[in-house]
Amino acid sequence: MQSAGAAIALRRLRAPSAVTAIVGLETIARDVRFDGGRGMRMACLAVIGLGLLVSACNSTKSEQTGSIAASDLAIGSGRGEAARGDGGGADPVTTGSIKPTAPVRSAEVDPGVVSWYAERHARFPDGEVLTYCHAYGCELQTAIQITEADLGELKAIFANAKTPADERIGIDHAVSWWENRAAPHLGGPPDRRGSEPKDAHVPGQTDCLDEATNSTTILVYLERKGLLQFHHTLRPDSRGGLLYAHATAVFRDTVAGKDWIVDSWMRDSGDPNDVMPLDEWLSKPMG
């Protein structure tokens, strides 16, 4: 068990280059309807993975993307200690996950979002304790208590959001807020952009699967609190094929029916994020 404020997880022994590659390959295989069953799928992917020395979310590929400019905000510095897995009904298991404290209310969320968390053995964001993934592939998960003061800061971010475009700026700010809120409790240095192999298993460092999960977590929380009036959280999507698979959080403009992404992977922790239509993001180069 990690000390208070550190990760609630057991480390899983995985080669750094395979941490995101295998999971990314599994997601891609599922998306193209590789229907041979999970066991067969994973067996085939393991064979492919033996030849992969480049992981998904490879940070050697620079990503030339714009972001919605964020105004200066009084981002919360993070109050209180991360919740421990032996408190509040959240108990760690040998897979490194934390069991949800209550059944997922699937009627309120997209089924793909629920399955995303299940596939990663990650705790679904239900309640006031949110789990933050880090160390690549959600290897470590830290529980963060969202206080009334935290909620007040999030409400302030969206107070003047009168249109879907306004709300997307708020989403950008909220993802940055969430990264800053979690950072002091992760037990490592602030997250650096990209995913260097040397940072695998390092507390506080994230790959794109961690980033996509964490951004989805705050989106689900915001939606559940009624702070998203024009958007609905969807399952993360990926691009880049087998060698450079890269995932990101996705949400839908419910007015226009258009899907958008918020991607924090190529940004240092807390920096403004890439926010753009999903089809534009999918059309960009690998990685």
Image (spheres, rainbow, N blue to C red):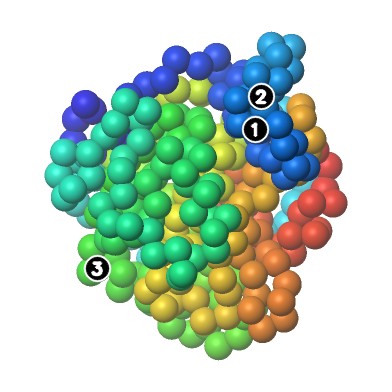
Question: Given contact means CB atoms under 8 Å apart, are the residues at marks 1 and 2 in contact?
Answer: yes
Residue annotated with mark 1:
37
Helix, strand, or loop for circle 2?
helix
Q: Position of residue 30 (x, y in %)?
A: 69, 40
The first of marks 1 and 3 along the sequence is 1
Q: Residue at x 44, y 77 (%)?
A: 227
- Mark number, residue 143: none
User: Is residue 42 among the parts visible in the rendering?
Assistant: yes
In the image shown, does 235 or 229 lie closer to the viewer?
A: 235
Q: Position of residue 162 (x, y in %)?
A: 55, 88
User: Is residue 215 among the parts visible in the rendering?
Assistant: no
Q: CA distance from mark 3 to mark 2?
A: 48 Å
Q: Is residue 37 left or right of residue 7?
A: right
Most extreme residue toward the bottom is 162
Q: Quadrant of the N terminus?
A: top left
The first of marks 3 and 2 along the sequence is 2
In the image shown, does 214 or 159 lie closer to the viewer?
A: 214
What is the three-letter code of the residue carrying label 3? Ala
Most extreme residue toward the front is 36
Helix, strand, or loop for circle 3?
helix
Q: Quadrant of residue 46?
A: top right
- Mark number, residue 149: 3
Q: Residue at x 41, y 20 (%)?
A: 12
Q: Residues within 10 Å of mark 1 (few under 14, many from 20)?
A: few
What is the three-letter code of the residue carrying label 1? Gly
Q: Position of residue 214 (x, y in %)?
A: 47, 49
1 vs 3, front mark: 1
- Mark number, residue 40: 2
In the image shown, does 80 or 117 lie closer to the viewer?
A: 117
